[in-house]
Image (cartoon, coloured by chain):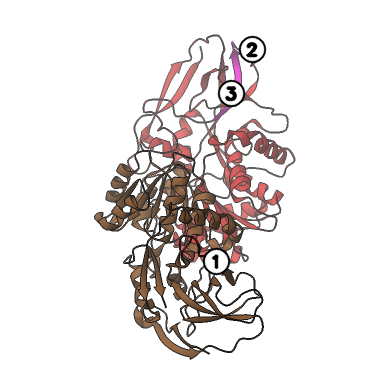
Chain colours: A brown, B red
């Protein structure tokens, strides 16, 4: 029964999330019952959606319960098994949460997935070849559905979703334009991720100014947009959308602290006959096999080389998560546990 | 060569449109060339979209040119013909504009359409069995695509689009809820148009209050919304949308005077995974035959009995149009010329 350090949600944020919302505790892992396996987590995934779940408000998912282990994706190794479906040593991804170990009922479908780390590093199954990658795939392929030659834009361009979006868009012959914060991220987006251009939103104080920069980066206008951010960035992009454009709305990180984040000119949706569609990828499990197959191939062939920000040790998870919400990460934010 | 009174756009509105933006002039109709017909207009159609075109700004249609006859739908009778396609006495609908007569090139496809007034009064081809009816049809059938038993809502409920929307929604087994201004319109919506409920937006000073009234009218939430108005009404409806709801965005009359009309909580599109889609029905000519067929049958069988507000005489068109923009009309706004 290994010693298991865990991070709980201790109290809910009022406004900005802070480190004292979390609490580090330790317990022993329980003895396994028949059908259960014990997974040792190598990596925790930190994702923006977790901030929304810290609030006690209506959203697509139930709120993170108080006093319980923070929920989230994990990648690790089976270290003990009372299930014929998993053997000790199997590499697996699941939803183990912010802790060092988890006990999983292997009979529940979808709880634990065996992965092959021959060509794809284990950590990438939490990013490019995991939930963020499938998120990019769904928004691009199913909502934006671009034709070759069209211009598609993504915000938070160097993050896990943005990186995958670039590779998927280039594979479809699109012009891919990123929006990111700071010159280092923008240079990286172009040099390493394959974006054709990248706009630094930090150089712009309002939507009008950002809109002008987008015009330079997207001389033929914008046909598809993948939104991770909201607020000023969405206002600016909306002003550059071409007729019949599509906007996949996946995150509005700028509004997670509870302040309203109005859309200034919704009439543009009408005048440009846009489709704006919100989605969460966990409601579209039917696309995961196809999406993961394409994403795995892109990684294995070097066409998608996602960057990772790796914090070390379970105790670093809260600060790393708060940094992610402020855009301090560079690429997929992970916590490495061993 | 009959004497032809015409109304021109003389100057563009700054803010609210006013009567002095228009100018009444007279001219003689020219002699017909081969292939042309002369149409005497019985009815002019007045529609909210015309206000948008009075502005000199980017929109889905080119601006109405200054110094030219106001463009718009017309229903009338062929009084002279140099085309084998039309005979004197034919009842026709077209885009003749705000004038008593128009000369039409009958060889240009789509310019003039012969209609049968045996079971459908001529004026209805400008409303329920014309562009507004097809607009309601497209938004309901192609964007909202409701299942029987779902709740669908429309603003400007007693207008030409709203009336058709109710009949089409009831034919599909939906709960149809209207939003209209004033107790008389709301009572009419329920008694004559078949709405299951109607909310009087004039009783509410803000979106929160209107949202509560919508909750009473839509106890199972809102699955589909057809937007003609924008502003506070859209904010209120958005707060009541069910997960995976659809919003057809067809008009935002509240914003035509140029003021921004923000959407207060666009994050709801994400958290409820909504689809918000703008459209204009003239870009979907492929659906017109199917839509007009259903709408004509609903009118001929008495299931859709649209109300009309009829102003008399070409000179009354500007004031009738300005009244329409303020919701003073009750049903489809027409101008009767003879």
Chain bearing tag 1 is A
Q: Are marks 2 and 1 in contact (CB under 8 Å)?
A: no
Chain bearing tag 3 is B
Q: Are marks 2 and 1 on the same chain?
A: no
| Mark drawn on residue B224 | none
In the rendered structure, the answer to whether residue B116 lies left or right of residue B57 reads: right
User: Is B78 part of what is drawn in magenta?
Assistant: yes
Which residue is rendered at x = 52% and y = 75% of the image? A77
User: Is B300 part of what is drawn in magenta?
Assistant: no
Disc 2 marks which residue? B84
Q: State whether residue B162 is above or below residue B91.
A: below
Mark 1, Cα crowd under 10 Å, few <14 / some 14-19 / many 20+, is some
Disc 1 marks which residue? A115
In the rendered structure, the answer to whether residue A127 lies left or right of residue A106 reads: left
Residue B92 figure quarter: top right
Q: State whether residue A308 is above or below residue B91.
A: below
By secondary structure, the bulk of the magenta-drawn segment is best described as: loop
Which residue is rendered at x = 51% and y = 11% of the image? B1
In the rendered structure, the answer to whether residue A149 lies left or right of residue B193 reads: left
Between the residue at mark 3 and the residue at mark 1, the CA separation in whole angstroms equals 64 Å
Disc 3 marks which residue? B112
Chain bearing tag 2 is B
Q: How many marks?
A: 3
Under circle 3, the secondary element is strand
Residue B120 figure quarter: top right
Choose the circle earlier in sequence order: 3 or 2.
Answer: 2
Q: Is residue B180 visible in this depiction of the protein?
A: no
Under circle 1, the secondary element is loop
Q: Are marks 3 and 1 on the same chain?
A: no
Mark 2, Cα crowd under 10 Å, few <14 / some 14-19 / many 20+, is few
Q: Position of residue B251 (x, y in %)?
A: 49, 45
* Span colored in magenta: B66-89
């Amino acid at each position: 029964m290994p010693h298991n350090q865990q991070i709980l949600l201790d109290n809910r944020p009022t406004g900005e999330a802070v480190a004292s919302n979390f609490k580090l505790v330790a317990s022993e892992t329980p003895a396994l019952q028949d059908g259960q396996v014990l997974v040792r987590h190598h990596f925790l995934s930190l994702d923006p959606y977790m901030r929304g779940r810290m609030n006690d408000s209506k959203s697509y998912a139930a709120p993170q319960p108080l006093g319980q282990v923070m929920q989230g994706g994990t990648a690790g190794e089976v270290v003990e098994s009372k299930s014929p479906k998993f053997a000790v040593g199997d590499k697996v991804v699941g939803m183990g949460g912010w802790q060092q170990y988890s006990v999983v009922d292997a009979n529940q479908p979808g709880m634990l997935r065996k992965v092959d780390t021959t060509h794809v590093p284990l950590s990438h199954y939490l990013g490019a070849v995991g939930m963020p990658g499938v998120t990019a795939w769904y928004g691009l392929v199913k909502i934006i559905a671009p034709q070759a030659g069209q211009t598609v834009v993504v915000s938070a361009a160097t993050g896990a979703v943005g990186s995958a979006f670039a590779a998927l868009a280039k594979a479809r012959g699109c012009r891919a334009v990123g929006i990111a914060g700071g010159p280092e991220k923008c240079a990286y987006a172009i040099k390493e991720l394959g974006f054709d251009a990248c706009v630094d939103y930090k150089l712009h104080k309002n939507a009008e100014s950002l809109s002008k920069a987008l015009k330079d980066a997207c001389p033929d206008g914008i046909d598809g947009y993948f939104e991770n951010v909201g607020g000023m960035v969405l206002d600016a992009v909306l002003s550059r959308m071409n007729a019949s454009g599509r906007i996949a709305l996946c995150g509005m990180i700028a509004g997670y602290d509870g302040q309203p984040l109005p859309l200034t000119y919704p009439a543009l949706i009408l005048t440009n006959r846009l489709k704006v569609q919100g989605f969460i990828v966990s409601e579209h499990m039917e696309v995961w096999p196809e999406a993961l197959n394409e994403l795995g191939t892109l990684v294995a062939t070097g066409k998608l080389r996602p960057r990772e920000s790796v914090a070390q040790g379970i105790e670093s998870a809260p600060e790393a998560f708060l940094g992610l919400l402020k855009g301090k990460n560079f690429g997929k934010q992970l916590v490495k546990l061993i």
